[in-house]
Structures are given as structure tokens and as C-alpha cells.
Amino acid sequence: MSETFFNLAWLIPLPTLIAFFLIILFTNQKKRLSSNIALAGVFTAWLLSWTVAFIAFFGAEVVVHPFDVSVPWIPTGTTMLSMGVMVDGVTALMLFMVGIVLSMIFLYSTGYMSFPGFVEDILKRGSLPEEEQKLGEKAKKEGLDPLYSRFFAYISLFATGMLGLVVADNLLMLFIFWEIMGLCSYLLIGFWYNKKYPNPDQITPSQAGLKAFLTTRVGDVLLMTGMIFLFILTGELNFQAIFNPETLHHLSEATVTLPIAGTVSWAVVISILIFWGAIGKSAQFPLHVWLPDAMEGPTPVSALIHAATMVSAGVYLIIRMWPVFAITDHGHNPAVTFVAIIGTFTAIFAATIAVAQNDIKKVLAYSTISQLGFMFAALGIGAWVAAIFHLIMHAFFKGLLFLGSGSVIHGVEHGHHHAHEHGDHGSHEDEYFDPQDMMNMGGLLKRMPKTGWTFIIGAAALSGFPLITAGFWSKDEILADAWYTNNQVVFWTLAIAALLTAFYTFRAVFLTFFGKPRTEAAEYASENVSSMTIPLMVLAFFAVVLGWIGIPDSWTAFGPAAANPVGDYLGEMAETYHLHYEALPFLPIPVLVSVSVALGGIFIAWLIYGRKPLQAGQPDPLVRWLGPVYTLLKNKYYFDELYNLIAVRPTLWFARADYWFDRNIIDMIVNTVGRFGRWVANFTRKAIDEWLIDGAVNGTGLVANATGSVLRLFQTGQIQQYLLVMLLTVLILVGMAEIIF
Amino acid sequence: MVVPLSWYLFLAAALFGIGFFGVLARRNAVAVLMGVELMLNAVNINILAFWRYVRPDDPTGQIFSIFVLTVAAAEAAVGLALIISIYRTRNTINVDEIDLLKH
């Protein structure tokens, strides 16, 4: 019975794809209709995904016997590449999360994509071609972004990508949808392609889009290499076929000798290559540089792509491919260790940078990088279930936080316009006002209560506020697993990272919502439309409640809530992959550390920023206390500059060198050949055409002319001469007759 | 005393030659006509010589000779008329200058 319902999984990526094509082809001019089509598409997808997900939850066989149907697609010699869908426990959870988060973000976007301020400047300058100027004016009257419809087309395509990725049953199909999301990421980050800043060093949206695409490309190439090797070795890309015990065993037995690493099994090589794809997509160190600059895109994009879904795709890939990672032949698996190292390092690396950021979206960006590091660290220590759990929870509260920050930014922007209209222009006319800078905010809780409280709930979840937030349960589980498996380095590093997380999150909260407004814009800020605040409230609800489905059994004080449905559900699945999942006993130390770290971070933030909130113009106390360290953190450890030096500049140099080569050497050869051809043609013309042929033709004419001139002399017109000639002729003829006869 | 035929023929030939020479070599158009007359008369002597010595009984020779004389006279009249016409238009009767056939 449930079989037929699982076939719905085929349809899940379809509604948003149809919406994309409809908007692009037909309704680009009609803005509201386009957003309604997009909403219809995503709500349909939500309905379908929740149907499949809940049937999977309550018909638990799918956890041990995944539903997998595929159709053959491309025959490749002796094997066949297929397209198919698979539904298992992880798919169900992901569908649950993706369905509702996407829908909330789409709904939010209909309110968020109002007419942007910088376009007004461009319109005023009047430098646009006439038709674009008219479109801009029309958009201004409607109050919506001029490219409104295109935005909804792009996010619909993106939703297709994510939904297709989640239901994919083989690596090839997953990769196709992975790339679709990469493309949409580029298109959406660079959505406001006209936006320019007065500071030439500040990255523009179009540059940021390119940076994101190129950086994730590095990871994607390695991922593709891993896929290719996997296919060569096993002839399969279908997940169920790869996770066949014989196939896994074959992978771990087959070895290859590499230059530095010596003889390693293919499973390790493939795992590490695939993990690099996740490093790129999930912005882990060293490929983390694109995510903070991706904040140039509209805030729904940041929520969609960089909090809830696309960056989760990297974690999802590793979760899917975990059986390949976890083949331990010798007890110690380099691939798993690599994952743990990268994850743990990134977690603390990004957390330190977030402390020194003033842009509210950048704080959240680094926070995302850090939390993804937590997930990879969890995988690295074998806590597969905890990683999945944290992934789902994080999507909700990070999405909430990003949408909340967008609401704040909108409110401040409205306040800025309001302040301008009410007379005080002062000297701020030409100065660039950054609505995202937290130093320009303050006291927004009173002015934007819905946004404020939901943001605080999200922040509490992110910090792991004990007991009542989802973040606590998921993070606590990771720390508990780290302690239980005696990974002390991982445990203490993640604990410090969690402390920093709580600190910088509430630093952001206090700077934004408490104290007195530090600028006029903040003073005049107002709450946003319900299409923006309702998603905030829905996501806040989940950020609190959802964690309760993962309370471990050992917390018996919570009675029935501690049935830990998620743990059991996923635990069963883990067993089929021969991953050992056991319900942990109640471990006091990790819990104590977890609680104290969360509350401690919040307390320190309150001490510095909450007790005596910063006044306008007052600098951040951290600048003075941390000194040069602060500068290092603010400049993200100068990694962008480093990459510019070792990667970007050489590439540009190489490109210019190629250009020089092309212009001077290749063109020279081509031009020389051309000139030689011309010379041959000229020579042929002079020597043969002029001399020979014209000579013959002209010569004939001359001869005829000469003959005629000579013969003309006979025609004198004198009769006596003619008679004389006659006489001579007769004499000759008679003489000849005499001689002959 | 009968003169042999050949004497008449030589005479006729000599006259013909002189006449032909006159036609070729004289510049005056009337002189050319005189040369033509001489040639015609030489031919006449030839015809009559042959008549008298070869077939004297047949009147054909005499009649033919009268024809020639008549035609000669008519032709002389026409020729002179032409010369007068030419003189009236070109004011010359020097045959070297009458070379319109040149074109």
C-alpha cells in the first residue's frame, strides 16, 4: 500500500520545475502572478514531501528496506545509468525539513522582494536605456523589485534541485541536482547584478556569485573524480548497489599506491575525493571563502541556500555515502579522521571569525560554517545519527535567523528612507548607509517585536540554550558522543566553539535589539508585513519543539518525551549499514559542559553588550581588548588575500600570458600565411595574367592591325593603279599557264 | 600583193598596247578616254583582219565591227559627260585626285 504512495517521490521535484518554466516563459511581466505560481509550486512540493515523509515515518520498514525504483536512462556499454528515487529514513527526515523550510522562505520572499534602495539611485542617474528606465519606474510604483519574477523563477529551480537531490537514488542524479543548485546559487547571489559600492575593494554581488561558483567548482571537480573512480571500480552508482556488503568489501580491499601516502585502499581515496565536494559545497576550511561574500545576495537567498538547504547538501552527501567512508579494514580509517579534523577545525575557526564581524548577515554566515563543522565533526567521530539530527535542527533555526536578519535589515532600510523623508538630510545624502551593519542598529526589539522575539528564539536555539530549544538537544548529542567515544580533542574544541557560538550570537542579539537606537534609521524602523513575519513564527515554533523528538532515552525525567523517536528511527537505519548505534547512558560531564558553555556564552555577551548597551559612535570594546587579534579576526585571517595571491593572481597572469601568445604568436603565423597567399596571387597576376595572356590577346590584335594597315595601302582609289594590277595579274597567269602546259 | 594576216595582228596589238599604256599612264581623264578609244579601235582592226582573211563571205565580222564602233561612240559620249560632271563638282580632271574609291 505504501508502495504506491512512495511513487509520489517521483513527482516531488516536479511542481517547482514547472513553476520555473511557467514563470520564465510566460509570466515574467506579471510580478504577483509569478510569485503566486512559485508559491503554488512549492506548496505542492511541500504537500507531496510531507505525505511521503510521514508515511515513511509510520511505516518503518522503509528504514531497513528502502524503497528504490529506477528507470534506465543512458546505456553505457555493459552497464546502464539510471534515474530513480529512493525513500528511506534519512530521505524522509530531509523531505520533512526541506518541504516546510522552502515553503516558509518562499512565502517570506513575496514580502521581502520590495523595491530596493540602490535601484532608486540608478534610476535617478538616468543612465539606463529607455525601456529599462520604464521598467524600473513601473517597479517603483508597484513597490516591488524590477526583477521580481525572475527571482521566483530562480528559487523555484533551486527548490527543484534540492528536492531532486534528496530523493535521488544514485550518485549521478544527485550530482545533476547538486549542480543545478550550484547554478542557482550563482544566479541568486549575483541577483542584483547592477549593485556597485563606492569602496572598490568591497565585493559586488556579481563578483560574489562568480566567487561562489568557482570555489565550489574546485570541490565539484574532486567529487566528480571520486564518482568516476567509484564507477570504474564497482560499475555502479546506485546507492543501494554500492552499499552491498560485497561491493563495500571489494572497495576496501582494492588498493592503489599513491606518491606520498603509500598504499591506500580505494575506499579511502574515493571517500576523501567525495568529501572535497562537500568541503566546497558546505563551505568548510579551506573552501569556506565564498560563503560570507555570498551574503551579497538577497536575504531569502541566504536563508535558502546558505543556511537550510544547499550547504546541507554537502552534509547530506556524506551522510548518504557514509558506508563507503566507514569501511574500516584496519580499525583506523584515514578518510573518517580527515572528516573529523576538517569539521572540528572549521567549527572553531569560523566561530572565532564570527566574533569580530559587524555585519549581521556575516555573523550568521560564519555561524553556518561553524555549525556545519560541528556536523562533519560528529560524522568524523562516528556519531552518524547525531549529525543528521543536528542538520535538521540547524536548518530550522538558521533559516529562522537569516529570515529574521532580513526582516531587521528591511526595517532599518525603511527607517532610513523615513528619516530622509522627514527632513534631516544633513551630510548623509551621498554617504553609503549600510543597513546590515549592527553598529547602525539598536533598540529594535520595541520597534519590531515579532522579528525580535523570533530572532531571540532562534539565537537561543543556535546557542544551545538548555532544554527548551532544539539546538540544545542536537548539540548536546554531538558533545555526548564525543565524550563517550573518548575523543577528547574533538570534545573540548567543540565545547569552546559552542561557547563562542553562544557569545557571538547573543552579541548580535544585544547589539541589534537592545539598548537605544544608534542611528536615525534604527529609530524609525518598523515591523514588516505578515508575509514576512508568519514564516518567522512558524520556524520559531519548530526551532523550539522539534528538538523534543530527539531527547535521549536516558533523560528519564522527561518521561514520554524521552522515547527518542528520532534516535530509534535512525538507529535502526544505522544498523543496516553496519554502523553501531547505541542509546547513550546519561553522561553528566558532557551535559554539564554543554549547559555551562551555552549559558556562559550568553552571560559573557550580556556582560559586555547587554548590561550597558553600546551608544551611538561608541566602539566595540572587543577592539580594544583583543587589539591585533581583533584585526586578524575581522579580516578573516587574511585567507581571501592569501587565495588571491596564490590562486587568483597566477590564474590571471596565465590568462594574460595566453592572450599575449594568441595575439602575437598565433596571429603572426596566421597573418604570415595570409600574406604569403596574397603574394602568390599578385605574382600570378603579374607574370601569367598580364604578361602571358594579355600579351597573347593584345598581340593578336596588333598583328591584325598591322596587316590591315599594310593591306589598306592597296586601296588608293586610283583606277589606273587597279588596271595596272589587273595587267600584271593577267601576265603572271598567262606565264604560269605557259610554263605548266 | 597580199599582206600576211600577222602584220594586221601585230598592228592591232601594238595599238592596243599603246592605248593601254595611255589608260594607265595619263593623268588627264580625257587622255584616258582617248586611250580607251585607241584600244577599241585596235580591237576593231583585229576583228576586221580576221574577217577578211578567214571568212570573207560572212557578214558577221562586219556587223560585229559596226557594233563595236557604235558602242565606242556611245561610251565616249557618256565618258565625256561623266568627266564634265566630275569637273563641275571637283574642279579637276586629274585622275590621281579622283580617288573616292579609296574609302
Image (cartoon, coloured by chain):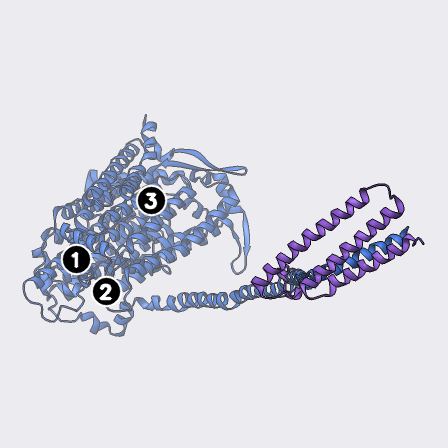
Q: Nearer the viewer, mark 2 or mark 1?
A: 1
Q: Are marks 2 and 1 in contact (CB under 8 Å)?
A: no
Binning the other alpha carbons within 10 Å of mark 1 as few (below 14), some (14 to 19) or many (20 upward) gives: many
Query: What color does chain B have in the rendering?
Result: purple
Which of the chains bears the disc numbered 1? A
Which callout, 2 or 1, points at the residue further toward the start of the chain?
Answer: 2
Q: Quadrant of residue A595?
A: bottom left
Q: Residues within 10 Å of mark 2 (few under 14, many from 20)?
A: many
SS class, disc 2: loop
Q: Colour of chain A?
A: blue
Residue A227 pos. (x, y %): 46, 47
Identify the residue at the far right of this view.
B1
Amino acid found under the numbered disc labelled 2: Gln
The residue where tag 3 is placed is A161
Say yes or no: labels 1 and 3 on the same chain.
yes
Between marks 1 and 3, how big is the CA–CA gap? 28 Å
Name the residue beneath numbered marker 2: A357
Residue at image location 16% in from the left, 69% down from the top: A430
Asked whether A690 or B93 is in front, the reply is B93
Q: Is residue A616 left or right of residue A272?
A: left
Residue A448 shown left or right of residue B51 in the figure: left
Residue in the image at 64% along x and 54% along y: B78
Three-letter residue code for mark 3: Gly
Are the two marked residues, 1 and 3, in contact with CB atoms closer than 8 angstroms? no
At label 1, the amino acid type is Ile
CA–CA distance in space, label 2 to label 1: 16 Å
Which residue appears farthest toward the left when viewing the image? A422
Nearest to N terminus: mark 2 or mark 3? 3
Residue named by callout 1 = A409
